[in-house]
């Protein structure tokens, strides 16, 4: 999710949710930056996978954080399937949309 703070700077929020339990696993807020670095996303997911286990698949939008070659390669190496939501189709990910 992308938003602007009071002084006009961009704030990007990455929230990861378990679709089955609807439990929010983590929220990462980046102020100023337009994208969250690949290694930061991998480190965040690595910690989640250690704590919660490796998921069968991950559903996400088509943002740069999850479509990058480094993240897709790492997930493929772990055997995690990726499911991407069509651009302009927020109803495909209703849980996170209603959470936000």
Image: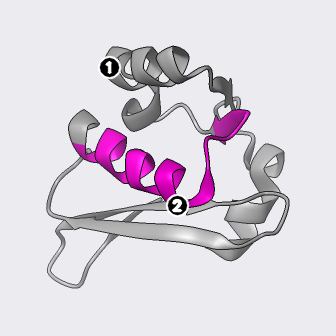
Q: Main secondary structure of the magenta part?
A: helix
Q: Quadrant of the C terminus?
A: bottom right
Total marks drawn?
2
Q: CA distance from mark 1 to mark 2?
A: 22 Å
Residue 37 at least partly seen: no
Q: Which mark is residue 51?
A: 2
Q: Residue at x 82, y 50 (%)?
A: 91
**Up-down: is 65 above or below 4?**
above
Q: Secondary structure at mark 2?
A: helix
Q: Secondary structure at mark 1?
A: helix
Alpha-carbon neighbours of circle 2 within 10 Å: few (<14), some, or many (≥20)? few
Q: Which mark is residue 61?
A: none
Q: Residue at x 85, y 59 (%)?
A: 20
Residue at far bottom of view: 6
Magenta highlight range: 40-59
**The one of 83 and 56 positioned closer to us in this rendering:** 56
- The location of residue 28, given as percent across then percent down, is 36, 66
Q: Earlier in the sequence, mark 1 or mark 2?
A: 2
**Up-down: is 97 above or below 86?**
below
Label 1 vs label 2, nearer the camera: 2
- The location of residue 85, given as percent across then percent down, is 70, 33
Q: Which mark is residue 70?
A: 1
Alpha-carbon neighbours of circle 1 within 10 Å: few (<14), some, or many (≥20)? some
Q: Where is residue 89, by image quadrant?
A: top right
- The location of residue 59, given as percent across then percent down, is 68, 39
């Amino acid at each position: 999710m992308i938003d602007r703070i009071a002084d006009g700077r961009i704030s990007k929020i990455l929230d990861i949710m378990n679709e089955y339990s609807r439990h929010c696993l983590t929220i990462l807020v980046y102020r100023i930056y337009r994208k969250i670095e690949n290694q930061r996303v991998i480190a965040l997911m690595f910690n989640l996978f250690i704590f919660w286990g490796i998921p069968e698949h991950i559903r996400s939008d088509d943002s740069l954080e999850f479509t990058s070659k480094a993240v897709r390669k790492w997930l493929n190496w772990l055997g995690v399937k990726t499911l991407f939501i069509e651009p302009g189709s927020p109803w495909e990910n209703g849980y996170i949309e209603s959470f936000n």
